Image (spheres, rainbow, N blue to C red):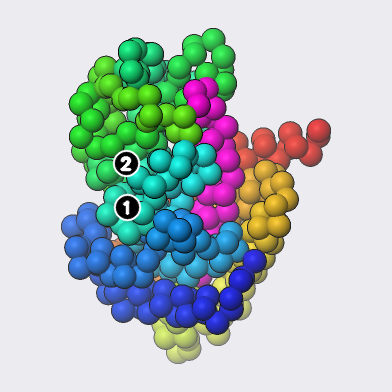
Amino acid sequence: MIRDKETFQQLISDIREFVRDVAIPNEDRVEAEDDIPEDVIDKLKELGSFGWSIPEEYGGRGLTSEELATAFMEFTRCSVAFRVYGGQNAGIGSECIIRDGTTAQKERYLPKLSSGEMIGCLALTETMAGSDATALQTRAEKVDGGYRITGDKRYITLAPIADLYTVFARTDGERGAHGVTAFLIERGTEGMTPGPSTPKMGQEGAPIGEITFDNAFVPDEAILGGEEGVGFQSVMKALNKQRINLSALSTGPAIRMLDDAVAFAKERRQFDRAIGEFQLIQAMLAECKVEIEAARALILETARKRDRGEDVTMDVSLCKYYSTEMCGRVADKVVQIFGGQGYVKGTGIERFYRDVRAFRIYEGTSQIHLLNIGKRLLR
C-alpha cells in the first residue's frame, strides 16, 4: 500500500540521489577498507534509512510493506554493504521490538535505532542451529532478578559493531520451539563478547561475527515483550516481513547488474560491431529482464497482501526463493556478458557475483523455502 504518492516519490528521489552521488562513488573504497566511511554513515542518517520501518511515534517513517520493498529495490542498486549497514535497523534489527516489545522497550530502543544512534542485530544462528532454528544450545538460566546466559552465536550480521542484540536462548530444554526466549542485550554487558569480523567471500563493509556468552547476566526486563518462551514465535513473525525485504534487497542488485550489462553491450565491440547486436547476448539480457520483472511483481503483490493483513507465510517463501535464486542467475549471466572484464576486479561485476551469493543462504536457505512451500501445498 502506497499511502501518499507524492511524499513517497520524494523519498524514492532522495534514495536515487544517495545511490548515484554517494554509494556508487564509494563502492571501491568500501571494498578496499572493509568498512563504511563516517561521512557515508552521516549521509545514511540524513536519508533516514535506519528508521524506514519504525513507527513515526518513535522517529521513523513507518513505511508500509509495499513502500519498504519499493524503497529497498532502489536502495540496493549499489554495493550490498550499504543496505546491510543502512537498512538492517529497518528490518531484523528492530522488527521483533516493533511487533512484540513492551512499551518501555520500544521507548528505550526504537528512537535510537531509528536515528542510527544504535545499530541493532538479530542473534539466532549457532553452530548447530542454522536452518533448524529450534536446535539452539545457548542457555538462559533463571537466577534472582534475571538470567545467566551461556553459549555462542555465529555468522551474525553486524555483530562486531552492533549496539543492541536480540538474542535467542533456550529457557526450557524440554519444550522445543516453545522453550526459546528472546532477550534484548546491549553492547558492554558483562560476560557477552562480540568477536571480530569473520573473513568471508564477499559483502566487504558489512561485517559478520560470533558472539560469546560466558555466564552473562541480563535482568528480567531484558526479555522481549516480558514473556518467557515465545522467542521463536517472535523471530518467525519478524522473518515473515524480513523475507519480503530480502527479496527486494536481492532484486535491486539484479537491476543494477542488468543496467551495467546493457550499457556494456552497447559499447563493447567485437567483429566490428557492438556485442549487443548478437542475438545470444540479446537473449541473456532479455532473460535477465524477464526474471527481474517477475520477481518485482511477486514481491510487490506479497507486500500488498501483507499490508491487507492476509497470511503471507507461503508467499514470503515464494518471494525469498525466487528472488534470491534469480539474482544469482542474473549475476552469472552478467559475468558471462562482460567476459574477462566481469571476472577481474575493476568493473564491480565480480564483486556483485560474490556479494549476492549469500542471499540464497541466510534467512532460510533456498532448500528450506522449497520445503516450506511444498508442505503448505500439501496441507
Q: Which residue is mark 1?
A: 112
The foreground one among 246 and 188 is 188
- Vertical comparison of 48 with 145: above or below: below
Q: Amino acid at mark 2?
A: Leu
The foreground one among 220 and 212 is 220
Residue at x-position 51% and y-position 53%: 246
Q: Position of residue 59 (x, y in %)?
A: 40, 60
Left or right of residue 31: residue 280: right
- Vertical comparison of 219 with 352: above or below: above
The residues tagged by marks 2 and 1 sit, at their Cα atoms, a distance apart of: 10 Å
The foreground one among 3 and 30 is 3
Left or right of residue 307: residue 278: left
Q: Which residue is mark 2?
A: 164
Q: Is residue 65 visible?
A: yes
Secondary structure character of the magenta stretch overall: helix
Q: Position of residue 171 (x, y in %)?
A: 45, 17
Q: Position of residue 55 (x, y in %)?
A: 48, 57
Residue at x-position 42% and y-position 56%: 58
Q: Residue furthest right?
A: 379
The foreground one among 289 and 190 is 190
Q: Find residue 57 and name its label.
A: none
Q: Which residues are magenta?
A: 227-255
Which secondary structure, mark 1? helix
